[in-house]
Structure formats: structure tokens, C-alpha cells
Amino acid sequence: MKLKLKGSEAAAGTSSTNGGNVGLATLVRIHNAGGTARLVSLETSAAALIGTFTIAPNATELLDKTSTDEIFAAHADVKLVGVAYYS
């Protein structure tokens, strides 16, 4: 699978008040660059929690979300970038 970048990778915010929508992306590549498992949270733009998951150390996941939903993580080791599938 190929991915098309929709922006530049940046550290995730580390609390609900500084989470971000990753440039209004609907598909986000999440990479944990650290050696510790980290909690990732997804919430609405009104700060209502949608859900959480733990990303393993040095792992990468793709998260599908609504454009205005916001992501934050337990540590800035977690990096985010908006992407799209590319064929």
C-alpha cells in the first residue's frame, strides 16, 4: 500500500486542550518513535472523548477519523501526519 502525504509530520499534543485535527485530515498515520507503549486518544472538536488505544513502541498505525476530530497522545514521542491512500 502506498500513502500520499497531506502535510508534515509533527509531535502529537499531549492533552485534550492541545490536541489537533492534523490539518483536517480524515486518515492519519500515527507513529510511536519511543520505546514505551503510549495511549492515543480521539475526541470531537467539542472535547468529547470518542475512544482510545495503546500504540506499541516503535509501531505505526493508521487512524480513520472525521476531519474535525482531534488526536492527542500521552507523550510527544507519538508523531502524526495526514495521509491518503494512493494507488
Image (cartoon, grey):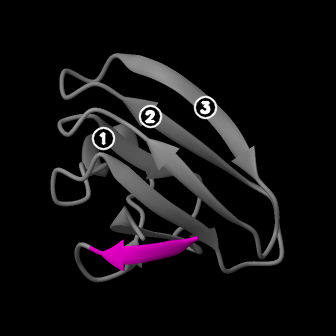
Evaluate if marks 3 and 1 touch, with contact meaning CB atoms under 8 Å apart. no
The numbered dot on residue 70 is: 1
- Give SS at disc 2: strand
* Residue 53 located left or right of residue 12: right
Residue 76: image x %, image y %? 51, 70
CA separation, marks 3 and 1? Answer: 12 Å
CA separation, marks 2 and 1? Answer: 6 Å
Q: Which residue, given by chain and number where applicable, does mark 2 sit on? A: 42
Label 1 crowd bin: few (<14), some (14–19), many (20+), radius 10 Å: many
Q: Quadrant of residue 85?
A: bottom left
- Amino acid type, label 1: Glu
Evaluate if marks 2 and 3 touch, with contact meaning CB atoms under 8 Å apart. yes
Relative vertical location of residue 3 with respect to residue 62 in this rendering, above or below: below
- Sequence-wise first label, 3 or 1: 3
- Sequence-wise first label, 2 or 1: 2
Q: Quadrant of the C terminus?
A: bottom left
Residue 17: image x %, image y %? 27, 42
The numbered dot on residue 22 is: none
Residue 11: image x %, image y %? 42, 73
Relative vertical location of residue 28 with respect to residue 69 in this rendering, above or below: below
Q: Which residue, given by chain and number where applicable, does mark 3 sit on? A: 52
Closer to the camera in the image, 56 or 29: 29
Boundaries of the magenta span: 1-5
Residue furthest front as drawn: 87
Relative vertical location of residue 65 with respect to residue 26 in this rendering, above or below: above
Identify the residue at image location x=73%, y=78%: 34
Closer to the camera in the image, 15 or 35: 35
> Is residue 4 within the magenta segment?
yes
Identify the residue at image location x=20%, y=40%: 67
Q: Quadrant of the N terminus?
A: bottom right
| Majority SS type along the magenta span | strand
Identify the residue at image location x=58%, y=63%: 75
